Every structure is written in C-alpha cells, then in structure tokens.
Image (spheres, rainbow, N blue to C red):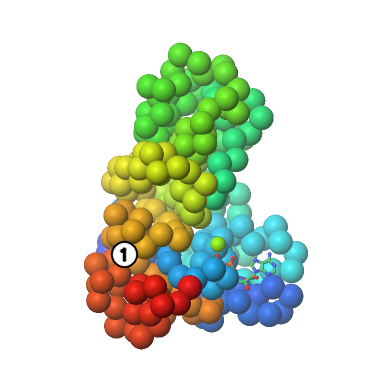
Amino acid sequence: MTTTRHQAKIETRSLTVSFDEKRVLTPIDVSIAAHGVTALIGPSGCGKSTFLRALNRMHDTVERAEVSGEVLLDGEDIYHRDVDPVAVRRRVGMVFQRPNPLPGSIFDNVAFGLRVAGHTAPQAIPERVERALRRAALWSEVKDRLRAPASALSGGQQQRLCIARAIAIEPDVLLMDEPCSALDPIATEHVEALITELKARYTVVLVTHSLAQARRVSDHTAFFYLGALVEFGPSERVLLAPDDERTRSYVRGAIG
Ligand SMILES: Nc1ncnc2c1ncn2[C@@H]1O[C@H](COP(=O)(O)OP(=O)(O)O)[C@@H](O)[C@H]1O
Ligand SMILES: [Mg+2]
C-alpha cells in the first residue's frame, strides 16, 4: 500500500463496535496525528474504552464483539484479513487502568514482551530492559533490585513498570486506559510527566476521567457521549471553548 508523508498515524473510517449485535459506537471517523497525546473524555459507559480497544484489535478475543469499518495504522487497515493481530499489538501497545504486573521479577516483567516476540537475541535482553526502564523513568528506583518481585513495588512504580513492559518492544502507538485512576496524586504526577516525555517518540491515546489531566497532558481531545464522537480538536478549544452543547455541559460539570 502506498504511504503519503502527511498521513495520520491512526485513522478510523466508519468504525463501529457491537456486542451481541447491539451497537455501542456510532460510526467513528477520526484522524490522530503522530507524536502527540490524544485524550478521550466523556461520561462512563459512553464508549471510550470500546473505541480504544478497537485500535489494537483487543476485541478479537471477545466472542460477542464485532468490529466493522476500518482502522488505518500508517495508512494500512489493521482489520484487513491478511493482517496478523499479534503483529498489530506489537506496534500498538496497551496500558490498563490497574497496574497488572506479571508474577515474577521486575526484570522478567520487562523482558517478557521481548522473549515472546522472539526478535531479541538473549544476550541483548538486559540492555533492552534497561533502556525501557530508563524511558519509563523507573530505572534509578529499581536498578539495584531487578530480581525482586514486581509485586514489591508501589502502585505508581508498578504502573511505570507496565509502561516499561509495553514500550520494551518499541511500539509506535501506546494506548492507555485511565492509567492513573488507581494511583495517588504523587504517582499520578510521575506517570503524567512520563506521558509527556513519551510523546516525543510514541503516539499516545489516553482515556481519562479527569478533565484536569486532559488539560495537563493532551494535545488533542475527543469527547465521547452515548457512543458517539461528539467533538474532536485541539485540547485547548475542546476543553475551554467547545462548539457542541453536549461538550459544554460535560466540561462545565453539568453531565457525567
Ligand atoms: N465486553 C462487553 N460486553 C458487552 N457490552 C460491553 C462490553 N464492553 C463494553 N460494553 C458496553 O459498551 C458500552 C461502552 O462501554 P465502555 O467502552 O466501557 O465505556 P467507557 O469506557 O466510556 O466507560 C457500555 O454500554 C458497556 O456496557
Ligand atoms: Mg472505560
């Protein structure tokens, strides 16, 4: 497929998701530029996570879920029948709401993805683990105890460890679903600072419950309401001077 220089990193075309034939997203067309943070905001149950998960084919594993439309990653549809979902997830990493470290050591958590992908020579793994932990702003806190169990880390450290695990395999895109909602304000500050750094290298799509967080870290904001993408644009405009009445109600705290 041909690529053009100014294309979006991710573009959706009439993307919808249904569960048991019930549509929970009205067809969504959106274009997300590379190297920035896009925040997805809106009340609970309005489809933010469903949309996010469609961007790396996470619904594939859910029997009653059906995705239609297209998700172009660098101009190529990730749902095309010739595309391997495992390869998609290598390019589009995911970080969840609750830190979900694997059983095992700090080192093994970050090495996991490299070992599974099988592209990294065993002797190169320690260096890749160090690089990912440095990029996740965790290295100085764990370098002397890489063999300690991941479960010994604080919640905020565990979330940065999960980010290190996601970026160890060097994806292009990082999807984050409310990554700070289980963290205290100090840990949240660490993770937000990290998100701001990561956007130099990755395209970040971040679901957040916090308008203040969207304001602090995002470049673009998408407002979801009842399964529809109501408004999308530069965060400053969407959060401070939205066009749509529903967005206005949400950002002034009248709904959701
Ligand atoms: N696995 C699933 N099975 C059935 N319905 C689901 C599933 N996941 C999400 N939904 C439904 O899709 C809608 C959107 O949910 P979700 O994307 O989780 O919203 P949000 O992340 O904005 O809170 C909700 O009505 C929810 O009940
Ligand atoms: Mg959600």
Mark 1: amino acid: His
Q: Nearer the viewer, residue 193 or 75?
A: 193
Residue carrying label 1? 220
x, y percentage for residue 228?
Answer: 49, 79
Residue 46, by quadrant, is bottom right
Residue 113, by quadrant, is top right
| Ligand 2 positioned in quadrant | bottom right
Residue 31, by quadrant, is bottom left
From where the camera sits, is residue 112 visible?
yes
x, y percentage for residue 83?
Answer: 58, 58
* Left or right, 194 with reference to 95: left
- Residue at 61% across / 57% down in the picture? 58
- Residue at 46% across / 14% down in the picture? 144
Extreme residue in the top direction: 144
- Residue at 38% across / 80% down in the picture? 249
* Left or right, 233 with reference to 10: left
- Residue at 30% across / 72% down in the picture? 238
